[in-house]
Amino acid sequence: MTPIYLDHAATTPVEPRVAAAMAECLTVGGAFGNPASAEHAYGREAAGLIETARAQVGALVGAPAGWVVFTSGATEANNLAVFGVAQACADRGRHLVASAIEHRAVVDPLRRLAQQGFAVSWVAPDASGRVSAAALQAAVREDTVLVSIMHANNEVGVVQDLASLARVAHGVGALLHTDAAQSAGKLPFDVRLLKVDLAAFTAHKIYGPKGIGALVVTPDARPWLQPQMLGGGHEGGLRSGTPATHQIVGFGVAAAIAAEQREAEAGRITALREQLWQRLVAALGGVQRNGHAEHCVPGILSVSFDGVHGESLVAGLEELALSTGSACSSATAEPSAVLRALGVPERLAESTLRLSLGRGTGADDAERAAAAIIREVRRLRAAAP
């Protein structure tokens, strides 16, 4: 039997309409031309499709098409934002601030900059995972040039109040960058309303292809962003390299579909998430939900089970496809840095499952998943010394 897929926070399957649109850009008879070849019809056709996709992607996050810079994914977009601002603003200030629960695509660039002499401050969230404006205010300084706070956390799903954090960042003249990979297309997100200067997101979290993402760059941020890839001046000079027409077109179609379905899907998936949680907490003692239950992206449920080990639990759940945490950190045996930052004890951090629901998840899937987890937790607890 095909396992029930509960790992949508790691990646999503490509929507068939997205795949069809991409295929039309790959072969003779389709828009296969180099979009930079404006001298002939093939190139102009590809360029036109890219600009349509740019507008679709921008519309998903409340940004004009001209603010959208295509990258290979959210990781590159985050790197461009962090390194790009730090390098461009080094003469103005060398202090950077981020939350203690950022994705590795932000954490690792900041650590590299710290090795290069930049000062980095990490802001701790409260026990629910939210970063307060007061905590951020205590961390920023006159020489702060960038604040990076992700919109929705990839492990526990908690959503930050970016508008209040933007006021703090802008109060000291810093730019606000956010990793919106888990929230774009799933929650209301408007860069102008949230006062965000730089926003990174990716196609494969919204049923588009892997290998394509975007960084939204507002006009205020553009002068303070240095490109990281050189060699042609594509994407307004911020990201050189021949654009991958088929991936960009797929991103655009995926963004348009996500915008159409977001509200209805958010309500449906939230209800399924709560159904799953209620089944677990009603049947099992020693169960803890991680992150803020109210301020949470619809599809993510992080649950710790006292008395069992997460890896053993996953091993016994062959009928489910899920994870113990972030897909980007699954190769390490260390307890989740996000859960540690939330104050979760190590024994519970090591007994945590991340259940992430999506478009393909139905009520029967949620019920079967709950029954399987309950069965396996009870089995492991009974076998424990």
Image: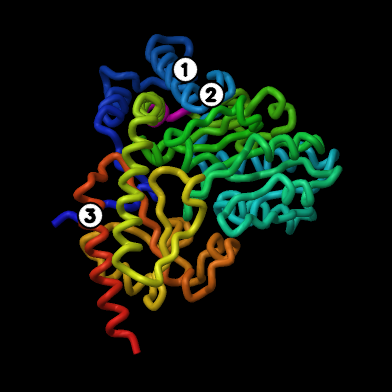
Give the residue type that dot 2 points to: Gly
Residue assigned mark 2: 62
Q: Quadrant of residue 288?
A: bottom left
Give the residue type that dot 1 points to: Glu
**Label 2 Cα crowd, 10 Å radius (few <14 / some 14-19 / many 20+):** some
User: Distance between the Cα atoms at labels 3 and 2?
Assistant: 36 Å
Q: Is residue 288 above or below residue 132?
A: below
Upstream in sequence: badge 2 or badge 1: 1
Q: Is residue 263 above or below residue 10?
A: above
Q: Position of residue 237 (x, y in %)?
A: 63, 26
- Dots 2, 1 in contact, CB < 8 A: no
Give whichever of 221, 59 is nearer the camera: 59
**Label 1 Cα crowd, 10 Å radius (few <14 / some 14-19 / many 20+):** some
Can residue 75 be seen in the rendering of this structure?
Answer: no
User: Distance between the Cα atoms at labels 2 and 1?
Assistant: 16 Å
Upstream in sequence: badge 3 or badge 2: 2
Q: Which residues are magenta?
A: 243-248
Judged from the image, the secondary structure of the residue bearing numbered disc 1 is helix
Which quadrant: the N terminus? bottom left
Label at residue 367:
3
Which quadrant: the C terminus? bottom left
Residue pictured at 42% horizontal, 30% vertical: 244
Label at residue 51:
1
Q: Position of residue 30 (x, y in %)?
A: 29, 19
Residue pictured at 22% horizontal, 54% vertical: 367
Q: Is residue 207 left or right of residue 1?
A: right
